[in-house]
Image (tube, coloured by chain):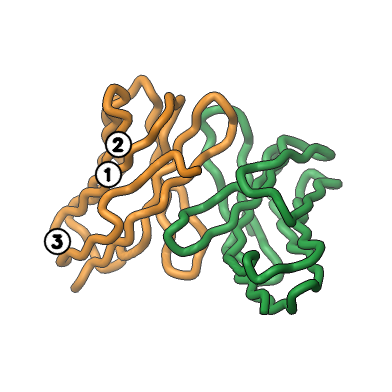
Amino acid sequence: NAGVTQTPKFRVLKTGQSMTLLCAQDMNHEYMYWYRQDPGMGLRLIHYSVGEGTTAKGEVPDGYNVSRLKKQNFLLGLESAAPSQTSVYFCASSYGGQGNSYTFGSGTRLTVV
Amino acid sequence: SQQGEEDPQALSIQEGENATMNCSYKTSINNLQWYRQNSGRGLVHLILIRSNEREKHSGRLRVTLDTSKKSSSLLITASRAADTASYFCATEGMTDKLIFGTGTRLQVFP
């Protein structure tokens, strides 16, 4: 029973490079989310999905793209990485609707140099 | 923009003492949740309180909600060193998305 699995756990990118973060959940959750966590800023929502094939922008979507081709997977892409995207990225999932808790992955620590 | 703000930002106590963290938010909510984050790990859900509830208990945790003041508090009784972590409140309003606060870092010394 893995829950939410994020890969990779660590990555260093050069400015301008691209990469994809993968999130996989095995709980049959409908909703999935990508957050970034920066010191003193708490968690900020980047993009989210309310079901397979759907995506929507969160609070800080610029510079990121997402895809939800399969219900269990939610991919976060950085097209041209910038130092401002240095952060810890968390994926979460939930059954959706009001009053449901989120299950989080263990995070991806990304450094852009 | 952050919906919730926790107070204090950091808290240090001795084992056996109680720890109280507060959360204030700005807009109407349907429910408020508390999460815990150990260093270098993801967040773990602790407890949810709905807008029509005033108090809820779970083990050593007690959560209160005052919708008139737009605030909530998390009390951890008889703290243990293993309670050392960051604690976040998160609010859910009309949209099905949680908005997280900035967190309280709790250090419990043995």
Q: What residue is shown at x 53% (from left), y 39% (from top)?
A: B98
First in sequence: mark 1 vs mark 3: 3
Q: Nearer the viewer, mark 1 or mark 3?
A: 1
Mark 1 to mark 3 CA distance (whole Å): 20 Å
Which element is circle 3 on?
A: loop
Q: Colour of chain A?
A: green
Residue carrying label 1? B22
Q: Colour of chain B?
A: orange
Q: What residue is shown at x 27% (from left), y 27% (from top)?
A: B69
Kindly indicate whether the residue at mark 1 contacts the one at mark 2 (C-beta within 8 angstroms). Answer: yes
Q: Tell me: A92 left or right of A14.
A: left
Which one is nearer the viewer's eye here, A56 or A16?
Answer: A16
Which image quarter is the C terminus of chain A in? bottom right
Label 1 is found on which chain of the structure?
B
Q: Amino acid at mark 3?
A: Gly
Label 2 is found on which chain of the structure?
B
Q: Position of residue A46 (x, y in %)?
A: 65, 49
Which one is nearer the viewer's eye here, B96 or A42?
Answer: A42
Q: Amino acid at mark 1?
A: Asn
Q: Tell me: A87 left or right of B109.
A: right
Q: What residue is shown at x 20% (from left), y 71% (from top)?
A: B109
Task: Using the image, tell me which numbered label, if any, was put on residue B16.
Answer: 3
- Residue B55: name its quadrant: top left
Residue carrying label 2? B72
Q: Amino acid at mark 2?
A: Ser
**Label 1 and label 3 in one chain:** yes
